[in-house]
Image (cartoon, helix red, strand yellow):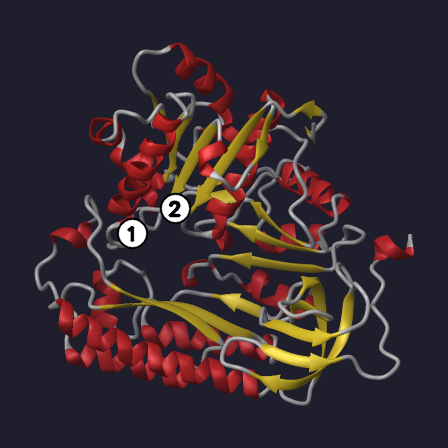
Amino acid sequence: MTECHGTPARKRLLIRTWGCQMNVYDSARMADVLAPLGYAPTDVAEEADMVILNTCHIREKATEKVFSDLGRLREAKAARGGEMIVAVAGCVAQAEGAEITARAPWVDIVLGPQSYHRLPEMVARASRAAGAVIETEFPVEGKFDHLPEQAAPQGVTAFLTVQEGCDKFCSFCVVPYTRGAQYSRPAVAVIAEAKRLVALGAREITLLGQNVNAYHGEGPDGAAWSLARLLLALAEIPGLDRLRYTTSHPRDMGDDLIAAHRDIPALMPFLHLPAQSGSDPILKAMNRGHTAAEYLRLIETLRAARPDLALSSDFIAGHPGERDADHRATLKLIEDIGFASAFSFRYSARPGTPAAGMAGMVDEAVADERLQEIQALLRDQQYRFNQSRAGMEIPVLVTGPGRHPGQMAGRSPWLQPVHFPTPGDLTGQIVTVRVTATNPNSLGGELPAGSKPQASERDAA
C-alpha cells in the first residue's frame, strides 16, 4: 500500500485540468487538500473514487467540452455502482453553477476556483446529501490561509500563485467574474511556500497571477510590496536559481519591475506581455487602457534594460468592430516588435462580458482568415528567434529524460525546450549546451567537452 503525505492511500483521485498555469497550480493544491483524506493520484477514470474536472471558461465551447467529459464519467460512475464522487471545479463551475447539475445530475460537487480549500467539507457533505453540493460564492475567508503547508513536489520547475483576480475588465474577458477582484498574497506566505518548493527539488519557480505584475502584497514591514520587491526577496533563497512570472498587463509594468529585469540575474530573460491588438480603436473597444504606440515604447524600454529579453504575447483576431485596417495594424505591430513566441485566438463571445453585446460582430470566416495570417507571421518569428540561438552555448535547466534513449531535456533561459544526448541523468542540474539544431518549437544541442553542471547555492551548501 502506498502512502500520500504520510496517510495510507485508501482512495484514488483523478484531476483533469484545462486552461492556464494557474489551473495547473490549483489542481496540485486540490490534491494536497485531499491527501489527508487518503486520496492518492490515478490516471484511470474507471478506477477513481473521485474525479475532478478543473475547467477553464476563457475560450469558446468550453462548457460543451466539460459536458462531453461528464457524459463519459457518467458511464464510469455507473460501472462502479455509483461509488464515485464527480466534481466540476474552476471557472466553468463558477460561471455555470447550478446549470451543471441540471444537465448532469450525476455530478456531486460544483466548486468555484476560490472555494477548493473547502473540499474536505464538500466531500463529507456530498457523501450525505441527496443532491449536489454547490460552492460558487466568493468565500469571506481567503483560500490561501486555509491550504495545507504540506504539498507534493512539483519537480524541477514549479508554479506558485501570488495574485488572483483582475480589476481591468477587458471587454472580452470573464476573469473578473469567475476569479473575482484583484487579491495579492502576503509576501511572507509567498516566500515561505517558495522555500518549501525549493526544499522539494524546485530550481525554477514561475509566479502566477491573472495580472501578476499588479501584485501589491503586504510585506513583512506592513507596507505593500511590488512584484519587483517580491522578486528581489525570492532571488535570495538558496537553491532557487531561476524566476519567471506570468501573466502581465502593460499598464502595470512599473519602472522597478523593468529594472528588475536588468538587475536580478535569476529573473529569466523572457516576458509574456499580452498586447491583444495593434489597433488603437480595437484596443479602446477592448478596454485595454493603452495604445499600440505606448505598448511599443514599453517594449523598447524593456529591451534597453535587458537586451536579450525574449517576448511573448497574446492576440485576438476578429474582436467586434475589427476592420481590415485594424487587422493590418495588428500585423504591423507584430512585425515591428518581433516575438519569440505568442498565443493567438479567434474572438469568441463569453456570456456576460461587454464584448458579447457589442455591435459589429466579425464573420467567422473573416476572423479565421485573419487569425491564420497572424499565426503564420508569429510562427515565422518564433522559428527565426530559435534560429538566432544556433551555435550559442546556453545554460539549460535539465527537467528530465528526453523522448529518446540517452537523451535529456530542459529549458533555455528563453523558455525553449532543449534536447541533448548525455550518458547520465542530469535532472535538476543547469548545464551548458551548445545549440546544434533549431526547430520551430525547440532546440537541439550537445554538451561541450569538459562541460560541468552549474552548482546552485543549495548544492554548495
From the viewer's side, name the closer residue of 436 and 352.
Answer: 436
In this rendering, the answer to whether 6 lies above or below 21 is: above
Of discs 2 and 1, which sits in the foreground?
Answer: 1
- Expressed as whole percent of the image width and height from the top left, the position of residue 93 reads 32, 35
Q: Residue at x 82, y 67 (%)?
A: 424
Q: Residue at x 57, y 61 (%)?
A: 257
In this rendering, the answer to whether 437 lies above or below 233 is: below
Mark 2 near mark 1, Cβ–Cβ under 8 Å?
yes
Report which quarter residue 242 is drawn in: bottom right
Q: Residue furthest left?
A: 359
Mark 2–mark 1 Cα distance, whole angstroms, equals: 10 Å
In this rendering, the answer to whether 70 lies above or below 1 is: below
Would you say 239 lies left or right of 14 here?
right
Under mark 2, the amino acid is Cys
Say few, some or many: other residues with alpha carbon within 10 Å of mark 2 (under 14 / 14 to 19 / 20 or more): many
Residue 110 visible to an observer of this rendering: no
**Secondary-structure class at tag 2:** loop
- Expressed as whole percent of the image width and height from the top left, the position of residue 204 reads 68, 57
Under mark 1, the amino acid is Cys
Would you say 123 lies left or right of 109 here?
right
Q: Which residue is mark 2?
A: 166
Q: Residue furthest right?
A: 461
Q: Residue at x 64, y 46 (%)?
A: 154
Q: Which residue is mark 1?
A: 173
